[in-house]
Image (spheres, coloured by chain):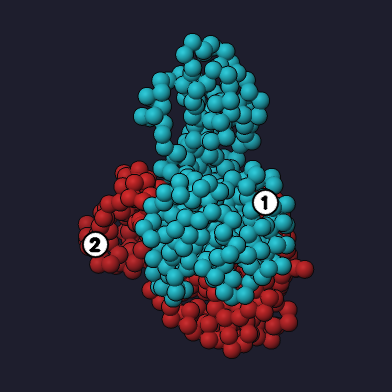
Chain colours: A cyan, B red
Amino acid sequence: MTIRIGIMGYGNLGRGVECAIKQNPDMELAAVFTRRDPKNVRILTEGAKVYHADEAKHMTDKIDVLILCGGSATDLPVQTPEYAKYFTVVDSFDTHARIPEHFAAVDAAAKEAGNVAVISAGWDPGMFSLNRVYANAILPDGKDYTFWGKGVSQGHSDAIRRIDGVKDARQYTVPVESVLERIRNGETPELTTREKHTRECYVVAEEGADLARIEKEIVTMPNYFSDYDTTVHFISEEEMKRDHSTLPHGGFVIRNGKTGWNQENTHVIEYRLKLDSNPEFTSSVIVCCARAAFRMKQEGMSGCKTILDIPPAYLSAKSGEELRKNLL
Amino acid sequence: MTIRIGIMGYGNLGRGVECAIKQNPDMELAAVFTRRDPKNVRILTEGAKVYHADEAKHMTDKIDVLILCGGSATDLPVQTPEYAKYFTVVDSFDTHARIPEHFAAVDAAAKEAGNVAVISAGWDPGMFSLNRVYANAILPDGKDYTFWGKGVSQGHSDAIRRIDGVKDARQYTVPVESVLERIRNGETPELTTREKHTRECYVVAEEGADLARIEKEIVTMPNYFSDYDTTVHFISEEEMKRDHSTLPHGGFVIRNGKTGWNQENTHVIEYRLKLDSNPEFTSSVIVCCARAAFRMKQEGMSGCKTILDIPPAYLSAKSGEELRKNLL
């Protein structure tokens, strides 16, 4: 039985979901929904159709799981509880601090409708969260570290673009390698923000702009840059296009912990991602969560779930028997 | 409510479980069972008692989860189905090829009795399996690699000890670092056994033994050494005791996979363990599986489960709310 997927929102993430569906033979793209004029949205999948977002609610019989590919700031807080009334849904809500309230709103809607809604699918929140939870459960006496990068932070890039005289910008978050090495060796240092990551900015300035002023505005920007060692490189538009047009990312979750009657033994658990494309990897996680959501719904479950609630085998297209034989 | 744990078998693993229980305030050690004379078994936990293995079946009202700490070769194939008739149980059965038949036998017994039985808890099978399953589900178009070490292989150490003229031996499995580096960089080479790991042996010979003959018997031993580049070091009993008395282990699970409409992007997922004590880390995984088994039993589930069937949150002592707030 093929799982029929609907995609709500066709940006980087929506396109990533479309690509991931192609790699999973147990799924098919049933429809793409957009707030733009559907005539102006070209998708990759032959035979699949683009509809206006308003039509989704009338297509509950054609879609098994609706994947919500909007942004966490304004789209998902509204869309996920709304569409959970009609569909089994998955989103990638990633504003960590607001997850509890998002969970509560989605849980109420999904339970009322008898649907399953998986929120915060992706890698952080998502696979990184999973690894924090596993490592904390295994080693209760220990310390966690999460490092991000090297990768493009869209929020920080946008913050630079808002500076007067900046035409384009790309910001990379870079973990401090020497600190990573210490932690891998079992040390558990207390680290300041500045000691964990550096920030590298590539900026295209308007002609005649005051570069010194722009650089100063960047490195002193509160919340975004002032707590970090920040480097600013001014480059040409051509260089930006040539060298900085992809969205790589990744990072590390490490937990060091002690075991033994007198805590005499140290263990290091490390999970690392090195991603050529942040949105495509996120989409790939979302798509296996869609499979799990479909199965949970079929089993009669309802309500809001996160990847922490999903039995790992539910994410896989393989049967329990196959998994035990070949991957356990 | 405290989870009352029984330990069946008090070797390295049983002692590790005892230490792990001490780190988890929601658990307590209710009893240790042994096939030896209980009078001769000294345990670490004050107030806990040692009983003969035969008494376990009469203590079902005193124990919530019985952890089976026997060996996979002969103990667990008998013990796990047997004790699943009386208790919620966890084992660390690690003969990969025989997992399907062990699962079937345990599943039948546990279902019949209405108990939950978690098998193959540990790190491989266990956490490594989990990471293979997650990575395969996320990146269906890719290739897996599992490397073990640097660490002591007890099976290989035992094989050397059986050679005539060998008094003691310790064998380390060592991953080939240069190959690891290639895979981390996104390459997906086809590798022979010899290219992935080397084997380092430390041997104490009997006085006057023929060292050249011992070395030759080791490096040519089929299944264990003949497919590897093996180095043999003859050392004194004092050196063995001083430098090789612990049981470190660990390893790497890496999956490289492609995404994108034309597979244009590469991603690397890496999970790494670096363990001072193989049995204590295994025990720590077993103990969180005991927590999960207890919860599944309380929810009315029954039958055989592996870590692939356990919602990650069930392994943690923290509530779903706490996990979403602090670790998601």
Q: Which chain is indicated by disc 2?
A: B
Read off the residue under disc 2: B226
In which quadrant of the rendered view does residue B74 lie? bottom left
Name the quarter where the N terminus of chain A is drawn: bottom left
Identity, as a three-letter code, of the amino acid under mark 2: Ser
Q: Is residue B279 left or right of residue B266?
A: right
Question: What distance separates the C-alpha of mark 2 from that of mark 1?
Answer: 63 Å
Name the quarter where the C terminus of chain A is drawn: bottom left
* Farthest-out residue, right: B1
User: Mark 2: which secondary structure?
Assistant: loop
Q: Residue at x 28, y 67 (%)?
A: B223
Q: Residue at x 44, y 39 (%)?
A: A248
Disc 2 residue crowd, few under 14, some 14–19, many 20+, Cα 10 Å: some
Q: Residue at x 55, y 26 (%)?
A: A161
Q: Nearer the viewer, residue B261 or B213?
A: B261
Identity, as a three-letter code, of the amino acid under mark 1: Val
Marks 2 and 1: CB-CB under 8 Å?
Answer: no
Q: Nearer the viewer, residue A198 or A177?
A: A198
Read off the residue under disc 1: A78
Q: Nearer the viewer, residue A140 or B133?
A: B133
Position of residue B46 measured from the top left corner of the image (x, y, whole percent): 73, 65
Position of residue B77 measured from the top left corner of the image (x, y, whole percent): 48, 81
Disc 1 residue crowd, few under 14, some 14–19, many 20+, Cα 10 Å: some
Position of residue A235 measured from the top left corner of the image (x, y, whole percent): 42, 20
